[in-house]
Amino acid sequence: MTTSAELGLPAITVAPGGVATTTLTVRNDLDIVEAYSLEVVGDCAAWTTVEPARISLFPGTSETVTVRLAPPRSPAARAGEFPLGIRVLPAERPELVTVPEAVVTVTPFHELQAALAPRRRRGWLRGRYRASVRNLGNTPGTVVLTPGQAGEDLRFRVTPERLRLEPGESAELRLQARTRKLIWFGKPAAWPFEATVGPQDAPGGKGPDGKEAAGAAGTTGGGTDGTSGTAPADPLTAVQRQRLDGEFIQLPILPKWLLALLAALLALLLAWFALVRPAVRSSAKQAAEQAVAQQSAAPTPAATPGASAPGAPTASPGGSPGGQSKPGAGQSSPGTGGRNSGPGGLAVPGTGQQSSATIDVQSANASSAVGSYQVPHGKVFDITDLVVANFQGDQGLITITAGNQTITTIALETFRNQDYHWVTPIQVAEDQAVTASVTCESPGTPASGKQASTCHELLNISGALSDIRQGN
């Protein structure tokens, strides 16, 4: 006593997207009423159903149910042969389970999805594109990208030449379109083209080199084993070639506005050499000739009585016999002679020598320091130039004095270099000093970039250092 089950067809063929049915007959050979659960097992279980999925049988009776196979039209339903089993499980006597089997053949189908990006490219000589391809069929295949153009203005290169795709797999093909010559001037040129994506053995197709692909319908060629024969036309692959439209916009090397600019520049250059340059040279020549004529016509100044020519001996009021004295040996006349240097007497004319001195003052933070230069005994110093250098950018105060006279007081943060010049010199008598008094509030940062630890100022004084004649 057992349970028996049998499928109506031992072999079933079904196309993806279609429906195929068969029957399952279950017989109860037990002496009890039995309920049976019907469950699909195997690779076809995802898209196979049993209607109804549960039945009850009296002893010695049987019932036939419908088995419905509906594989989807997608890569999930792979092409090929797959086992189909229906497990018949008794509720009361589960040990008497039985699984009738059949073979299901899923037929192949081909479907490609392709897109060209970008559809339009701009460039001087070439454009690069990407063709994305996805295999939506249920069987592996090799696809090719076949570009073409109505004329012979473009040349194409496809990388890789062939692409092997599994069901559901996607990949990219790289396409390059190149023109045969450059456009130097003028308007942009538009070159439309087509790129066809399809199986390698699709009828009527062409390979990447533009030649007719092997296996095209109506052609006879050698087989893979070297024999000759006619390749059969496959109606499924004949409709799978997808056309992609693209365009390459070739730009000129030199645009129109550049030509106009070059023409304007050339016109300006010609105008300069033809008109402006001769006029400028003529005006400059006339101005030079006029200046020379004015200088030639100017009268020579007459000699003033009692005035000596440059380099001549200076006449002294009580002069020596002959009315002449050695240069610098006579006493200076009022208003033009030596300057009063204080209790030390008068400066001796002709003894002055250019001299300069530098006072270096360094003071710690929040402290003061004084630097000085003392005029030698028997000398008088006529200061004409003074330069103060605050090269660190310190903050504080500096006071400059000459003898008992304060020349200036300056805030250090207001300058880096400060200079003074006098037409009438500042006199410093013998044994007196020029001092620089610095009060440091904050040391600055020199060019090295590291803040200094002390304030540092330099004072340079320049002028004439002359001998003095002591009073009687």
Image (spheres, helix red, strand yellow):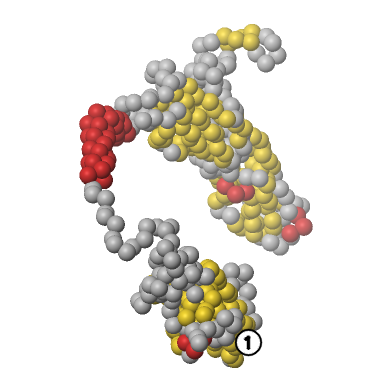
Asked if 7 appears above or below 52 in the picture, the reply is above
Residue 421 location in percent, x, y?
Answer: 42, 72
Q: Specify the quadrant of the image occupied by residue 253.
A: top left
The answer, for residue 347, to whether it is visible in the render is yes
How many numbered circles are shown?
1
Using the image as rendered, state which of residue 59 and residue 459 is in the foreground: 459
Residue 175 location in percent, x, y?
Answer: 51, 31
Using the image as rendered, state which of residue 74 and residue 392 is in the foreground: 392
| Residue that extends furthest to the front in the rendered view of this protein | 321
Q: Looking at the image, which residue is at 74% across and 60% down? A: 93
Q: Looking at the image, which residue is at 51% across and 18% down? A: 210
Using the image as rendered, state which of residue 344 and residue 63 is in the foreground: 344
The answer, for residue 27, to whether it is visible in the render is no
Using the image as rendered, state which of residue 81 and residue 122 is in the foreground: 122
- Which structural element holds mark 1? strand
Q: Looking at the image, which residue is at 58% across and 55% down? A: 53
Residue 121 location in percent, x, y?
Answer: 41, 35
| Label 1 CA crowd tier, 10 Å (few <14, some 14–19, many 20+) | some
Q: With 293 as the anchor, is 42 left or right in this view?
A: right
Q: Looking at the image, which residue is at 51% across and 11% down? A: 218
Q: With 358 as the anchor, is 303 left or right in this view?
A: left
Asked if 181 appears above or below 283 in the picture, the reply is above
Amino acid under label 1? Answer: Ala
Asked if 364 appears above or below 185 in the picture, the reply is below
The residue beneath circle 1 is 364
Residue 233 location in percent, x, y?
Answer: 53, 18
